[in-house]
Amino acid sequence: MTDSQKDNRFYITTPIYYVNAAPHIGHAYTTIVADVVTRYKRLTGAETFFLTGTDEHGDKVMRAAAAKGVSPKQYADEISGLFKGLWVDLMITNDRFIRTTDPDHIGVVQSILQKVYDSGDIYFAKYGGLYCVGCERFYTERELVDGKCPDHDTTPEYIEESNYFFRMSTYQDRLIDHITGNPDFIRPERYRNEVLSFLKEPLEDLCISRPKTRISWGIELPFDDKYVCYVWFDALINYLTGLGYPDDPKFKKFWPVCRHLTAKDIIKPHGIYWPTMLMAAGIPLYQSLNVHGYWTIEASKMSKSLGNIVNPLSLKDKYGLDAFRYYLMREMSFGLDSSFSEEALVARLNADLANDLGNLVNRALTMAAKYFDSRVPDPKDGPGPTDGDLVETAARVRADYIEGMEGFAFHKALIAVWELVSLLNRYIVENQPWELAKTEETAGRLSRVIYNTLEGLRFLGVFLVPFMPGTAEKILTRLGVGTTAAVAGLDSTAAWGGLAGGLPITVAEALFPRVDASQTIVREEAKKMEVHVEPIVADLISYEEFQKIDLRLGIVTAAEAVPKSEKLIKMTVDIGEERTIVAGIGKQYTPEQMVGRRIVVVANLKPAKLMGVESRGMLLAVVDEKEGLSLVTVDKEAAPGGRLS
Ligand code: ME8
């Protein structure tokens, strides 16, 4: 297959989720990412296939079912149904929902096991190890805590068991070569390095069977009916079954462009077991493994007892699906961890969606309705002086958006889109259409300004299709454009001016009503529980209030550690006059490093004594979870004393 043929096809998979517990925010995130990127690829005109599903065999599920007193299959049916239902609620557009209990999957797993067995890569051997009866599994020495099972606090027994093993070790060098020769095989890079570092140790063979006497809930080995297949060997193969391996034309078409999506918890099975299994089965490797970080639930700024009150999935009901999808995609940098908070979601909803985007759409459509009889005007005047900037920015935003989407940097794609949102808001303010509407002489200019604003909305509508399908549809239908691929594909934004004059405009309800930030679920619950919650940080202040803070650029002329203090540094700072400032930055910076630095100083803070030294001012720094503390500075050699505004 040539690269250009490949370019037009796209196959994405999510992990198939265990059915031992109900779906949660992590599952929702991965599946929404897969949906966003698939919708984006459809927008580019690609032929796509999107697979998700559930992983139903193995001891985890067997035990969860037993605890409920139902059969594993009944249990799997119930939980698998919850996942399937959730994907409908989240507007997920998967092409197949696979279950590892599907008959075609059982057939494919057995055919691959047989193939690998016939080629000599599966062997039978006696295995001796430390076995915990409570967990019904073997432990390695390293997994034990003081020689005991970490879950049961009992000493495991040494038992011997015969099992089937996959010769994974044989493929170690080939796998290393493949990963080193294909930089995009595992991405982002940190995870590629993690896999390569596992591979520095000798790879062991993989035990791929479980005796039925121990675990009966699994796919029977085709060459020994006393054993079932290990759950990971079974589960990974779903990515082939989903395409109808081996004979369905979909397999031929989509397998060469397969992209797996997972979180960092399962890179070992995906980055090591799976490619070596494919090698053994004589099947080409997938194109790439795309790994994201973890959502953590943080009780930030509030009492810990409130931390877990909010089920993140329930937030979509309160705040709407599109706001929920937007928050997840905007907040997480793909590859890194993020902490989930209802308040952050509300802050984004109010600022980015209700304020910036919602108001823009409403304003623009209302003006078109008022001045042009609810039609898209044909621009009568040529472009004015500010128009070139708008057109150029739109083209650059489009390029950044494409780069972000192609590179799975979704938050960057959204940042780019919001640049256009801000610019359009500014464009309206600068051009003051309400003034232009006052006289006949400026009617031509008015038509150009409104046309450009509406054209900008059309671009936004198209860019937002993958992230917020409902909102994008509203924007495009209110513009009279419609949402069929022919008019709303990404190509339709290749050049400015594609919006046809005369289309009917509809003004309708606000896209995103503002939410009262004091009435979040967390805060309502806190009131009931009489738990104190800190006020919301993002209380708005007026420009006049901001003006009261005198921020000055300073240069550090001398610095020394404050005696007996671990982190205080005393500095002499030139801010147009000389000041002594004491700051707690000694863990990150030495006094020598400070001398000569440009820093930002709050100059009108009341003096304070720190360890006996009077500080007349405060310097600004930002604290980052990963990078620690870093100083705020300016990017040119500006003179000290200058006021920041
Ligand atoms: O591992 N943050 O299933 P699983 C982000 N059945 N994503 C998260 C997350 C979190 N806190 N928690 C879970 C299995 N996920 C196997 C997979 S594939 C052949 C077999 C998401 O139900 C993320 O995608 O434990 C993670 O990789 C997956 O759920 C694990 O799902």
Image (tube, rainbow, N blue to C red):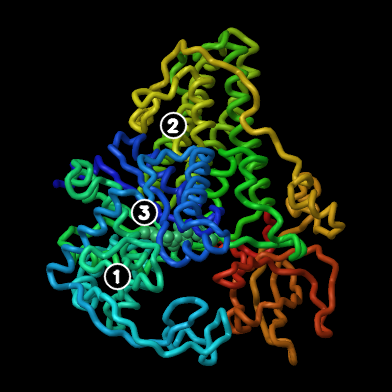
Instruction: Say what amino acid the circle numbered 3 marks.
Output: Thr
Mark 2 vs 1: CB contact within 8 A: no
165, 74: nearer the viewer: 74
- Along the viewing direction, whichever of 151 and 516 lies nearer the viewer: 151
Dots 3, 2 in contact, CB < 8 A: no
Which residue occupies 37% across, 23% down?
487
Q: Amino acid at mark 2?
A: Val
Q: Which mark is residue 100?
A: 3
Residue farthest toward the right in the current orientation of the protein:
530
Residue at (65%, 55%) from the top-left corner? 341
Q: Are marks 1 and 3 in contact (CB under 8 Å)?
A: no
Location of residue 316 by image quarter: top right
Q: Which label lies toward us, 2 or 1?
A: 1
Residue 488: x %, y % from top left? 40, 27
Which amino acid is tagged 1? Lys
Whole-Å distance between the Cαs marked 2 and 1?
56 Å
- In the picture of the structure, the residue carrying the numbered disc 2 is 462
Earlier residue among tags 3 and 2:
3
Q: Is residue 194 left or right of residue 243?
A: right
User: Would you place residue 400 above or below residue 615 in this image?
Assistant: above
Q: Is residue 625 left or right of residue 495?
A: right
Q: Residue at x 84, y 85 (%)?
A: 612
Q: Assess mark 1: CB under 8 A from ligand 1? A: no
Q: Secondary structure at mark 3?
A: loop
* 3 or 2: mark nearer the eye: 3
Quickly name the residue at label 1. 226
Residue 585 in the image, given as x and y percentages of width and height: 66, 77
Q: CA distance from mark 1 to mark 3?
A: 20 Å
* Whole-percent x, y for residue 322 in the image: 56, 38
| Marks 3 and 2, how far apart at CA | 37 Å
Circle 1: element type: strand
